[in-house]
Image: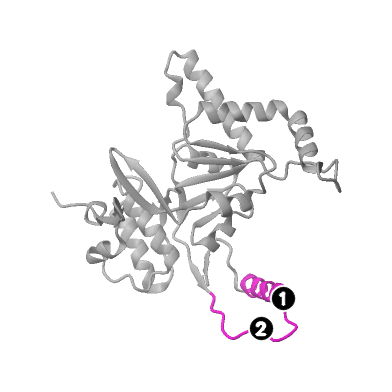
Amino acid sequence: MSKTLREQSQSTLQVDQQKYHIFSIPRAAHYLGNIDRLPKSLHVLLENLLRWQDDDSVTEEDIRALVAWQKDAHAEREIAYRPVRVLMQDFTGVPAIVDLAAMREAVKRLGGEVEKVNPLSPVDLVIDHSVTVDHFGEDSAFDTNMRLEMKRNHERYAFLRWGQKAFNKFRVVPPGTGICHQVNLEYLGKSVWQEQIEGKWFAWPDTLVGTDSHTTMINALGVLGWGVGGIEAEAAMLGQPISMLIPDVVGFKLTGKLRPGITATDLVLTITQILRNHGVVGKFVEF
C-alpha cells in the first residue's frame, strides 16, 4: 500500500539534545513538485494540511490543489484548516466556558465521565479592557482599582478560575495584565509550537484564530492568525476544522525611504488606503 503525503513528508529536526518530528515542506516537494512560487503564508497552510491529512476532512486532492495555486495565483477549492490554538477575550470566552460546563452537567446526568469534556485545542482567555479607572494620580491607584475590579466582578472571575482548574488546555490571563492582542504578542505567541504525542516530540508552526478584532497583529511575529466569531472559535476549541477557500495572497513591496516630515502614521494610512482600493477582504497580505 502506497504511503500518504502525510507519511512521505515526515522528517526529524535536531535542536541541541532534543529531536523533533516535523512535517517537512521540502520533503513534501519531492512528491508534489516545485513550490518555489508558493507564498510563505500558504507554506503554513500546506504544512497544516499535510499534518492533518486523514483522507476524510483533508485529502491528497486538497493538498495538491494548494500547490496548484501557483499556476493562476487563485484556487476555487475549500480546505479544512485547524489552528493550533484559540484566543478569546472574556466577552466571548465566558459563554464558551458556560457551554462546556453545561455539557459536563449533561454528561453527569447521563452517567458519563465528565472529565472527558474538555477543549481539544489550547484556549487562552484574556480578561482585557476590564479595569475601570476610579482612582488616578497616586502611587496606589492601580492596586486600588484592581481591588474594586475584583469586588465588582467576583462571581465571573470565580467562575473562570474554576474553569481553568476544571478543564484541560484552558488558561485564563487575569485582569490588569494587558489587552488581548498585547498579551498575545508579548506572552502567548510562539514562532514554533511543540507538543508531546505518544512519547514523541512534534514541532509545527504556531497558528491561531481569535475573537479579538486585532488578532491579525500576531502576523507581525510570523504567526498566522486572524479574527473569527465566537461560534467559529468555539468550534475550533472543540477540535472542529475551519472550512475556508484557499485564499488569494496580495503582495506588497516597500522601497526607498520616507521624506522628512512624513511620519510612520502617514505611511501606514497610505498603505491601508492602497490595500482597501485593491480589495483584500478574505485574502492574505504579505509584505
Task: Say if residue 286 shows up in the picture.
Answer: yes
On the image, the x and y values in percent for residue 37 come to 37, 74
Q: Which image quarter: residue 115?
A: top left
On the image, the x and y values in percent for residue 222 come to 49, 62
Q: Nearer the viewer, residue 225 or 222?
A: 222
Q: Residue at x 68, y 39 (%)?
A: 175
> Which one is closest to the eye, mark 2 or mark 1?
2
On screen, residue 12 versus residue 222, left or right, reads left
Q: Is residue 218 above or below residue 259?
A: above
Q: Residue at x 46, y 27 (%)?
A: 117
Range of residues picked out in magenta: 252-277
On the image, the x and y values in percent for residue 95 come to 62, 33
Which label was assigned to residue 258?
Answer: 2
Q: Residues within 10 Å of mark 1 (few under 14, many from 20)?
A: few
Name the residue that disc number 1 marks.
Answer: 266
Which label was assigned to residue 40?
Answer: none
| C-alpha distance separating marks 2 and 1 | 10 Å
Query: Is label 2 in contact with label 1 (beta carbons under 8 Å)?
Result: yes
On screen, residue 263 versus residue 100, left or right, reads right
- Mark 2 and mark 1 lie on one chain; the one further toward the N terminus is 2
On screen, residue 62 versus residue 135, left or right, reads left
Q: Nearer the viewer, residue 213 or 55?
A: 213
Disc 2 residue type (three-letter): Leu
| Tag 1 secondary structure | helix
